[in-house]
Amino acid sequence: MANVNISAIIKSISSKNHVGIISFNELCDYFYKYAKKHIDENADLAPYTTADFQTTLRRDLNMLAQNGEIVLIAPDEEKMAIAIVSFYVERYASIFNDIQDNPGISYPTVDELPKKVPRDILSKVNAADFIQAHIEKPLKDDCSLYALEFPKGVASVLFPSTITVESLLESALAKIQTLLAKEESHDYFLKKLIVANQGKEISINNFFDQFVQSPRDAVNALKTNGDTFYYWSQLCFFIKQDYEKSKEYDQKDVSILQAVYIAEFATSFYKNKTQQNLQRDLAFKQLDSSFLKPPYYFSFRDISKFADAKGVPLLGQYTEQELKDYLHLITTDAPENMLPRVLVFKTDADQHYFILKDKVIPLIVRLCSDARITVRERMTNEWFSTLRKFQMLPEMKSQMEFEKKLEQEVDITSPVLCALLKSPFLPTIHFEMQEARTPSSELVNLFINGELIPYSEILMMSRQELLADAKIKLPFWYSIPVVSWFMSLLFRPPKPKTPKKSPKEKIKEKMQKNEETAAIAKAEVAAAASDKRNPKISRARELRASAQFAETQLVPASSSIDRELESYVHEWNQLIDKTARDNLVEDVNSLIRDYMRKVLRTLKSDGFTLDRIQNLADTLVKTPSMQKIKNHDALFMYVQLYMIKLVKSIPN
């Protein structure tokens, strides 16, 4: 059957003769004559001109039957016949087209199917499930005839796949509108709705009049207006209640009941969809508020783990694809000549982060404060080590080399800060802030004449002061010219021949080290879990390993847990008096320690996960003692880190 379209030939026979059932013998005669006539045009017809061509034709018909294009009647008997599905699909599609023009025409039912037609030609489906599954999704182009089954014994509707479910809904609403347009039915059902909704007479009248006068507009109102769902449910209930009182139905009554059920199923679908949309919109609002929390910059993986106030993950209230579409929207949609409210930047390690535009400058200020301590300490130690060897580095002598060195150090110790300072959107943010600046507001000035200020000014570091600090650490005799010169001749080492690693290579090494630390922590957790010889030591070991693994998830590779704790203290503890400030930190630490003592008594050795830490921290931050502290986001991060630090220090 490779190049012989058996299906098209059978449909052609059916269309010409206006029949839906063809006997096998008639089909054989037609095929034999057809093959003889067209064999010169199509050599593939040769098998149908032989003496045993019926065997070939039977095989082809079986294949069509498996595809659902035909149904074989009495396939094992001599009087076998073929029922063509497409004939009945077209037949009942024309009836539905007539219903669109005349709603008074009843829906075709299964009982109206000719007795000779096998019921296997139908695909029986639950009407509610079918309508809700396909009301917005087109049916497969498979030329099928469905039997829509309704509850309470209401006759099934014959529904061809060439008609859309939305057209079915429109016809159902048109039938109900025809019923309500009658004066006695109009007043009767309107009164029922008003009695059931005291005080909402105007709303009920508007709903009723809109539907009766323009049923097609009612479909759009049903999709978008949440107020109509309740009224539709009541109206459908009252119509069903009234019709079900009668024990005898005529064909028109059955058609009205079918239409009411169709409208009811569609109402339920659009109501659920509206609720899902509202839930999704609320979840996206909560996602927006999560961008306001530390550390203010998030990867896609971090965003996919956002949760609401009750700890329920937001991913699930919207799909991953909807999340990607939303992130694309908020990072591209912006007023004219303005940046979007959420920006994307990437580090040299090709890690992408999302950040609110309003949080870029505050984050830079915070990261600069943290980086200054780290970079100063690293460079002071490096310069001290170099001076001890009676050597000099280019950055000690040249301000230009000093700026390059600072940039390299920032790239290594704080990749996020380096990425933000190099980001293409930073000049525009600075310009927008200047435009929106008020006389009383302060502006962090990062640019002069459109150029980024030197790193030494960003980090507030002086080359001369740094060199002086490194020299102070040297033994006193390094400052005696003659002695130092003589010692340099003896102890100055030869210049190293090994090439220095680039900043990117150092970053990769740092990331690999971080991954190795996480892997070691996981291995220690597994080792502790398998060590049953000393349960106490095993439990302590596993808790410490879990804490170390959690640390790798919360603390950047370029930072440390103590540095992060100190950074968050500056955010939530804004007391000016040093004594009061230190007392507040100690009070908070004491609360955390007391709380963790109680928790550790019952905490399972494998239960100290990041999710568990976040739940514990959230519970503690919401206590009355902690509620007095204003910056709860920074406090929440501090509590998590301090808990990890405590568990890491658990003795055996």
Image (cartoon, rainbow, N blue to C red):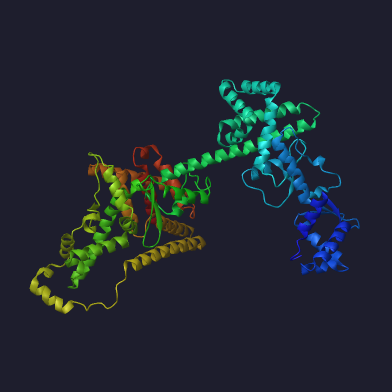
Residue 222 on image: x %, y %: 59, 35
Q: Is residue 232 left or right of residue 277?
A: right
Residue 421 on image: x %, y %: 30, 56
Q: Quadrant of residue 573?
A: top left
Residue 551 on image: x %, y %: 40, 56
Residue 650 appears in the rendering: no
State whether residue 493 is above or below residue 470: below
Along the viewing direction, whichever of 284 and 614 lies nearer the viewer: 284
Along the viewing direction, whichever of 541 and 84 lies nearer the viewer: 84
Along the viewing direction, whichever of 372 and 348 lies nearer the viewer: 348
Residue 200 on image: x %, y %: 57, 22
Residue at the (65%, 28%) spot, across then down: 235
Residue at the (22%, 39%) spot, across then down: 439
Q: Is residue 94 left or right of residue 480?
A: right
Residue 108 appears in the rendering: yes
Q: How many marks?
A: 0
Q: Quadrant of residue 167?
A: top right
Q: Is residue 287 left or right of residue 449?
A: right
**Looking at the figure, which quarter contains the N terminus?**
bottom right
**Looking at the figure, which quarter contains the C terminus?**
bottom left
Q: Quadrant of residue 451?
A: bottom left
Along the viewing direction, whichever of 412 and 253 lies nearer the viewer: 253
State whether residue 503 is above or below residue 16: below
Residue at the (16%, 65%) spot, across then down: 471
